[in-house]
Image: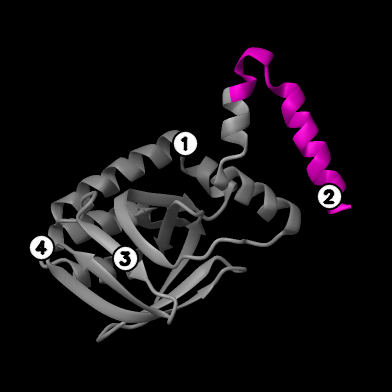
Amino acid sequence: MKKSVFLLAFIATLLLVPANSRAQSLKDLFNKENVEKVVSAVTGKNTVDMTGTWSYTGAAIEFESDNLLMKAGGAVAATTAEAKLNEQLSKVGIKPGQMSFTFNTDSTFNAKLGTKTLNGTYVYDAAEKHVTMKFVRLINMNAKVNCTSSSMDLLFESDKLLKLITFLSSKSSNATLKTISSLANSYDGMMLGFSLEKKE
């Protein structure tokens, strides 16, 4: 049955693609990330794990439901909130290319920010899209994980993100942390975090 659904979806996709752009679209259709999404949708299983090194590319924001997103003002509010979070993270030294996370197969990980490296252990539940990270000298950090083979968002409740920023960055200031906290309070039901890209 699942094979039939996949075949019908594939045929429908082909019919919707104009002839003159079919070659490029077929290439895009069969790239690794899109194939993973189709397999995940058909089988209900996430086939991607989070092992490897991931480099920070910017802030990530997600509303817990579409209803909350609409109440907050929709896509414009999300874009505005993301820009504000990017600005505040930049003030504490968290900028694209300057922070990375490495998740190893033995359930250890490290986070690097500039010259500072912090180690810990993690437990990743691919089915629940959830990771629990334990830094040395820090309480457990629970995060939602949106992961493909090439990109990943680590999303935290705002108070957990504030603790993590304070722990990672020597430049964190009360004013910046208050601004991030205020941002989160302005959009109830919003998760904040990091958008990451896998290093080759």
On-image quarter of the C terminus? bottom left
- Which marked residue is nearer to the observer: mark 1 or mark 4? 4
Q: Residue 153 versus residue 49: which sits nearer the camera?
A: 49
Q: Is residue 67 above or below residue 141?
A: above
Between disc 3 and disc 4, whose residue precedes?
3
- Label 4 residue SS: loop
Q: Is residue 75 above or below residue 123?
A: above
Mark 3: few/some/many CA within 10 Å (<14, 14-19, 20+): many
Which secondary structure type mostly characterizes the magenta part of the structure? helix
Report how far apart the C-alphas of labels 3 and 4 lie in the structure.
19 Å
Between disc 2 and disc 4, whose residue precedes?
2
| Labelled disc at residue 75 | 1
At x 47%, y 72%, the residue is 131
Q: Which residues are magenta?
A: 1-23
Q: What residue is pinned by disc 3?
A: 101
Percent x, y of residue 185: 36, 56
Q: Is residue 4 magenta?
A: yes
- Label 1 residue SS: helix
Mark 1: few/some/many CA within 10 Å (<14, 14-19, 20+): few
Amino acid residing under circle 2: Lys
Report how far apart the C-alphas of labels 1 and 4 lie in the structure.
31 Å
Between disc 3 and disc 1, whose residue precedes?
1
The reply, left or right, for residue 11 in relation to residue 1 is: left
Q: What residue is pinned by disc 4?
A: 171
Amino acid residing under circle 4: Lys
| Labelled disc at residue 3 | 2
At x 34%, y 44%, the residue is 82
Amino acid residing under circle 3: Phe
